Image: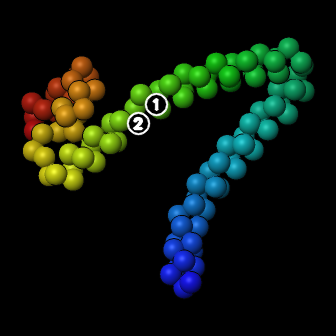
Amino acid sequence: MQAVIKEARQTLLLAVPIVIGQVGLMLMGVTDSVMIGRVGTVPLAASSFGGGVFNIFFIVGVGLLAPVAIFASRARGRAATTRPANTSGTGSSCPSSRASRRSG
């Protein structure tokens, strides 16, 4: 039982900053709604619609970039000599990754 309590304590210590960040984001959204709502209903509706459209692109972007972390951790785990951008195939079209390959 002590091991479970120890693990739970460590997990909660890792989770607290994430929880604080999420609560902060929610409070920012509430503050935006209160401030824009005082202007009028049409601006508030426009803000809500724009937020929904932004969230679609944000979620798609996060989904497309999530594999980069996986490939990078695999490359680091096997002590690869190539850069993670080369192994994932996502960084080959980025000009900055080409410049870093030439210099490194």
In this view, 62 is above or below 70: above
Amino acid type of disc 2? Ala
- Residue drawn at (65%, 48%) of the image: 22
Is residue 75 shown left or right of residue 104? right
- Residue drawn at (54%, 29%) of the image: 59
The residue that mark 1 highlights is: 63
* Image coords of residue 80 (percent x, y): 13, 46
Q: Where is the C terminus found, in terms of image quarters? A: top left
Q: Nearer the viewer, residue 56 or 25?
A: 56
The answer to whether mark 1 and mark 2 are in CB contact below 8 A is yes
Is residue 5 shown left or right of residue 61? right
Q: Is residue 13 visible?
A: no
To which quarter of the image does residue 95 belong? top left
In this view, 99 is above or below 20: above
To which quarter of the image does residue 94 belong? top left
* Helix, strand or loop at mark 2: helix
Is residue 25 shown left or right of residue 68? right
- Residue drawn at (64%, 18%) of the image: 53
Marks 1/2: CA distance?
A: 5 Å
Residue density around tag 1, few if under 14, some if 14–19, many if 20 or more, within 10 Å: few
* Image coords of residue 64 (percent x, y): 41, 28
* Image coords of residue 21 (percent x, y): 62, 51
* Image coords of residue 62 (percent x, y): 47, 32
Q: Nearer the viewer, residue 4 or 47?
A: 4
The residue that mark 2 highlights is: 66
- Residue drawn at (81%, 31%) of the image: 33
Q: Is residue 51 visible?
A: yes
Amino acid type of disc 1? Gly
Q: Where is the N terminus found, in terms of image quarters? A: bottom right
